[in-house]
Image (spheres, rainbow, N blue to C red):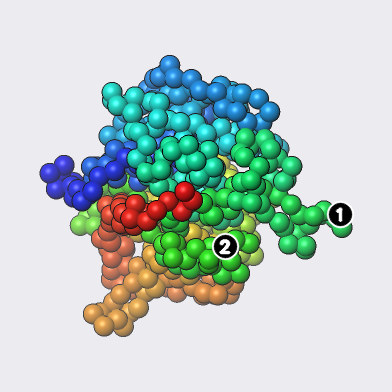
Amino acid sequence: MDAKDQPQAKVTRSIVFVTGEAAPYAKSGGLGDVCGSLPIALAARGHRVMVVMPRYLNGSSDKNYAKALYTAKHIKIPCFGGSHEVTFFHEYRDNVDWVFVDHPSYHRPGSLYGDNFGAFGDNQFRYTLLCYAACEAPLILELGGYIYGQNCMFVVNDWHASLVPVLLAAKYRPYGVYRDSRSTLVIHNLAHQGVEPASTYPDLGLPPEWYGALEWVFPEWARRHALDKGEAVNFLKGAVVTADRIVTVSQGYSWEVTTAEGGQGLNELLSSRKSVLNGIVNGIDINDWNPTTDKCLPHHYSVDDLSGKAKCKAELQKELGLPVREDVPLIGFIGRLDYQKGIDLIKMAIPELMREDVQFVMLGSGDPIFEGWMRSTESSYKDKFRGWVGFSVPVSHRITAGCDILLMPSRFEPCGLNQLYAMQYGTVPVVHGTGGLRDTVETFNPFGAKGEEGTGWAFSPLTVDKMLWALRTAMSTFREHKPSWEGLMKRGMTKDHTWDHAAEQYEQIFEWAFVDQPYVM
Ligand SMILES: Nc1ncnc2c1ncn2[C@@H]1O[C@H](COP(=O)(O)OP(=O)(O)O[C@H]2O[C@H](CO)[C@@H](O)[C@H](O)[C@H]2O)[C@@H](O)[C@H]1O
């Protein structure tokens, strides 16, 4: 879009994103994508936007931070029985101030949150530091010559950033600071809440009377032994209680989190805050995910000329060592190998699916049991199945472009980005109709009011049979109804997945937040 066509916000604000990850600096999943692109979309609409995240260094990713300069600002954070010094680095890119909090606990091998032995034992400490640093950044960092000041909208993402609204309420507002600021909690995934034993509360440096905001008691069935009282502190709960507004990353998920099935223990609390709870479907970064320009692809294509997609498919088959055949449906899966993503259903369905004339490629890392299963399945079905264990952004782009069908049997999915990328690339999604998947994938209807309708298949309930039914329907449409298939591809490709619409909805939420008094004064 030309800069002159870029819609502008009616009211511009100072916005401070706080996050555990943002692409391209550090990404482990969809949170990184969103925090790497929504801030840019908001800045393009005229807001002043800062993103505060850790400066993770672990060798391979160091180059991502190469353009971030040392600001010479140091602060000491009083927590965990001491005073911990952090410093700030800064890069101005795409009209956004990217601020990186530096501390030795962010410099280590492994992924962002853990290594082969599991989650890091000091994650509570690492993200407590991030939250304190994020509260100080707008007050002390002169970025482009000016501080952001006390009139900000803090956008706190998931549990890593959830201490921010608690700190605003407990440590700043009582002293007259940040009374004009507001906070919005964005829930990308309720499955991770930052829960630690209650005995860690004094480490957080919060006044004792604020214990109730973080207090969390496990139900009896979830306790480890008869003497376990289940007492814990829960960062995400703290933000649910103290944030001015709560956003989930789709409307479907904003309802699901208020139910016993989808609320992960926080459903009653979230229901009590329904008046400030909204859902906004994520957009995608179309500079990064665009089949007409994508640097990771061997060939480019567009809705007007799909020939490049067939070439991408052939290249992908070659790269994977699968028979190069245009007529065979190529199904892809990309994602964390996690219970959430329904990998166990794929595992159960594979023996039956492999009886069909089909090819299947999976890219993912996570649970070692599923990683091992992917490797062994590959050796059982040499001409049909490839399991790529690892995390590779270029490979994910090539799979998205080269496949005909993208499968997402997620047990729950707050929004899901891969189905949006798939549609953008003319790859037809077959998904479990849950959360954001149900909101974004419209099931194919050959007899719609205006002719054929739909962009994929959203099956429900989540069973192996139903998933196989949806895949078989998709495969037979691919083989036997080429014009319908092309219609499906084109309808997906022409849908508006840009961030601009979502950014406008976020502006509305911010406006409502500033009309109200802060939730905790
Ligand atoms: N092995 C691999 N190699 C390369 N890339 C890989 C990969 N595994 C995953 N990815 C990438 O990571 C991202 C995953 O995003 P999703 O939104 O699908 O899921 P995630 O559960 O991480 O995000 C959570 O947050 C997002 C953002 O709000 C929600 O959409 C989602 O529902 C919620 O669960 C995609 O960009 C995908 O391509």
Where residue 488 appears, x then y in whole percent?
32, 67
User: Callout 2: helix, strand or loop?
Assistant: helix
Where residue 362 appears, x then y in whole percent?
53, 52
Where residue 128 appears, x then y in whole percent?
58, 36
Disc 2 crowd rating (10 Å Cα; few below 14, some 14-19, many 20+) is: some
Q: Is the residue indicated by label 1 positioned so its CB lies within 8 Å of ligand 1?
A: no
Decide which of tag 2 and tag 1 comes sooner along the chain. Answer: 1
Tell which of 500 and 341 is nearer to you. Answer: 500
**Residue at the image position 43 percent from the left and 23 percent from the top:** 89
Q: Residue furthest right?
A: 226
**Residue at the image position 35 percent from the left and 46 percent from the top:** 38
Mark carried by residue 269: 2
Tell which of 80 and 290 is nearer to you. Answer: 80
Q: Residue furthest top?
A: 72
Question: Where is residue 70, by image quadrant?
Answer: top left
Tell which of 476 and 217 is nearer to you. Answer: 217
The amino acid pointed to by label 2 is: Leu
Where residue 290 appears, x then y in whole percent?
30, 47
Circle count:
2
Q: Say left or right for 519 vs 423.
A: right
The amino acid pointed to by label 1 is: Leu
Question: Where is residue 22, by image quadrant?
Answer: top left
